[in-house]
Image (tube, rainbow, N blue to C red):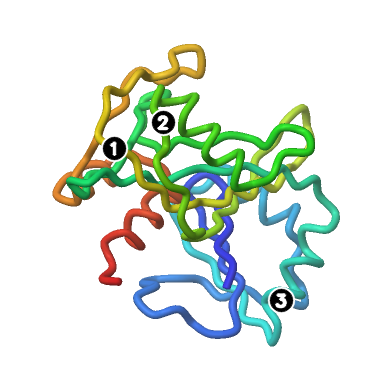
Amino acid sequence: MYRIYINETALIISEFVPTGLGKFQNIDPQSFVFRDFYKQARKSGPQIHLILVDNAKDYFKKLRKAYQVIKAAGGIVANPDQEYLFIFRKGKWDLPKGKLDEGEKTRSAAVREVEEECGIKVGRLLDKLTNTWHVYEERGEVIFKKTSWYNMEAPKQKLIPQLEEDITDARWMSKNDFETIKMNTYPTISNIIDLLKSPL
């Protein structure tokens, strides 16, 4: 299953109807034109659209082939008190992340971005939690951005937000804070919080 965000609009490509999806609109995969959908989605409010196909991976690969893909990586960092590292950037709660440097491995980029944006030292890099996708426009070009998210551990330490990256705050937050964060964050981050709330 693939969940692609355009602002607040989610486009889901799947072989089945995901549980707990709520209200959604079905899209015919045969007549779907992504560029037209993108233009519409940029102007609409929060909506969920579902494309049901036999092979989601193949369909998504073909869809994004016509567009530039930018890779990024980020971290979900937990301390021994089971608090998680969040940043406040451009008026919204977020998780530390950034684009890969040329030739850089995704896992290395995830650690580097966390350490640079929050001024900490990561203790352990663990498994990948998930990938997120969102689509935006830059200089008239439509771009697919894939962010790979990794679980990490770090000692509880002083946080130094990277001001030059528009990060004005960095905090350790408990699971009790998650609902407050979800009230002022991005849909992709909200989805990650839902994964963290799920029992292991």
Of the image marks 3 and 2, the number of the one nearer the N terminus: 3
Q: Nearer the viewer, residue 39 or 189?
A: 189
Of the image marks 1 and 3, the number of the one nearer the N terminus: 3
Q: Nearer the viewer, residue 45 or 144?
A: 144
Q: Amino acid at mark 1?
A: Pro
Q: Quadrant of residue 3?
A: bottom right
- State whether residue 25 is above or below residue 46: below
Image x and y of residue 121, in percent: 41, 31
Quadrant occupied by the N terminus: bottom right
As helix, strand or loop, the secondary structure at mark 3 comes to loop
Q: Tell me the number on the disc at residue 29.
A: 3
Distance from Cα at disc 1 to Cα at disc 3: 47 Å
Q: Amino acid at mark 3?
A: Pro
Image x and y of residue 74, in percent: 51, 42
* Residue that badge 1 annotates: 155
Quadrant occupied by the C terminus: bottom left
* Residue that badge 2 annotates: 121
Mark 1 burial class by Cα count in 10 Å: few <14, some 14-19, many 20+: some
Q: Amino acid at mark 2?
A: Lys
